Image (spheres, grey):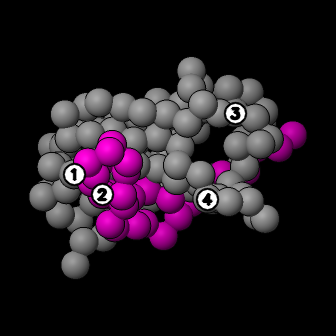
């Protein structure tokens, strides 16, 4: 059973920073693409960022230049560094592991339980 456990969420003021971590229970995930989704109340789930096993990254337009996804395969851990946070970044953030299908679309297979990020003064 593969498990993903997020940590690092919390309350931060606008303009502040947070770093989310996602610890995976299985080393085989080093071969998978890792991603972060977020979902705010009343809104659709949004794919925030992905990183392939080789380190190629992709970001939603809403976070480009502010968020950075990374991974440490030796630690089976993925990260999401979030800078210049805005109130509209407030959401539950979910780590996942999945694959890129033939058209390049990310298809998550495993999900974490989520961690809340609240940006407010």
The residue depicted at 36 percent of the width and 58 percent of the height is: 107
Q: Which residue is mark 4?
A: 45
- Decide which of tag 2 and tag 3 comes sooner along the chain: 3
Q: Are marks 1 and 2 in contact (CB under 8 Å)?
A: yes
User: What is the distance, in whole Å, between disc 2 and disc 4 at their CAs?
Assistant: 16 Å
Identify the residue at the far right of this view: 121
Q: Which residue is mark 1?
A: 32
The residue depicted at 25 percent of the width and 31 percent of the height is: 55
Left or right for 95, reference 67: left
Q: Which residue is mark 2?
A: 98
Let me know if residue 96 is in the magenta part: yes
User: What is the distance, in whole Å, between disc 1 and disc 2 at their CAs?
Assistant: 6 Å
Rendered-image quadrant of the N terminus? bottom left
Let me know if residue 59 is in the magenta part: no
User: What is the distance, in whole Å, between disc 2 and disc 3 at their CAs?
Assistant: 26 Å
Point out residue 68 in the picture as x, y percentages from the top left corner.
46, 30
The residue depicted at 78 percent of the width and 65 percent of the height is: 42
Q: Which mark is residue 40?
A: none
Identify the residue at the far top of this view: 65
Q: Dot 3, how many residues are within 10 Å of its Cα: few (below 14), some (14-19), or many (20+)?
A: many
User: What is the distance, in whole Å, between disc 1 and disc 3 at their CAs?
Assistant: 28 Å
Q: Are marks 3 and 4 in contact (CB under 8 Å)?
A: no
Mark 2 lies on a secondary structure that is: strand
Give the vertical position of 15 relative to 103 (above or below): above
| Camera-side residue of 34 and 23 | 34
The residue depicted at 20 percent of the width and 41 percent of the height is: 53
- Decide which of tag 2 and tag 4 comes sooner along the chain: 4
| Camera-side residue of 49 and 1 | 49
User: What is the distance, in whole Å, between disc 4 and disc 1 at their CAs?
Assistant: 21 Å
Point out residue 70 in the picture as x, y percentages from the top left corner.
35, 35
Q: Which residue is mark 3?
A: 85
Rendered-image quadrant of the C terminus? top right
């Amino acid at each position: 059973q593969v498990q993903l456990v997020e940590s690092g969420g919390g309350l931060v003021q606008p303009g502040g920073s947070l770093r989310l971590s996602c610890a995976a229970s299985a080393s085989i995930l080093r071969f998978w693409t890792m991603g972060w989704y977020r979902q705010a109340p009343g809104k659709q789930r949004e794919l925030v960022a992905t990183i392939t096993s080789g380190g190629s990254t992709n970001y939603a337009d809403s976070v480009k230049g502010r968020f950075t996804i990374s991974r440490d395969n030796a630690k089976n851990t993925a990260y999401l560094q979030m800078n210049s946070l805005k109130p509209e970044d407030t959401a539950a953030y979910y780590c996942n592991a999945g694959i890129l299908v033939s058209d390049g679309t990310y298809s998550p297979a495993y999900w974490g339980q989520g961690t809340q990020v609240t940006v407010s003064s």
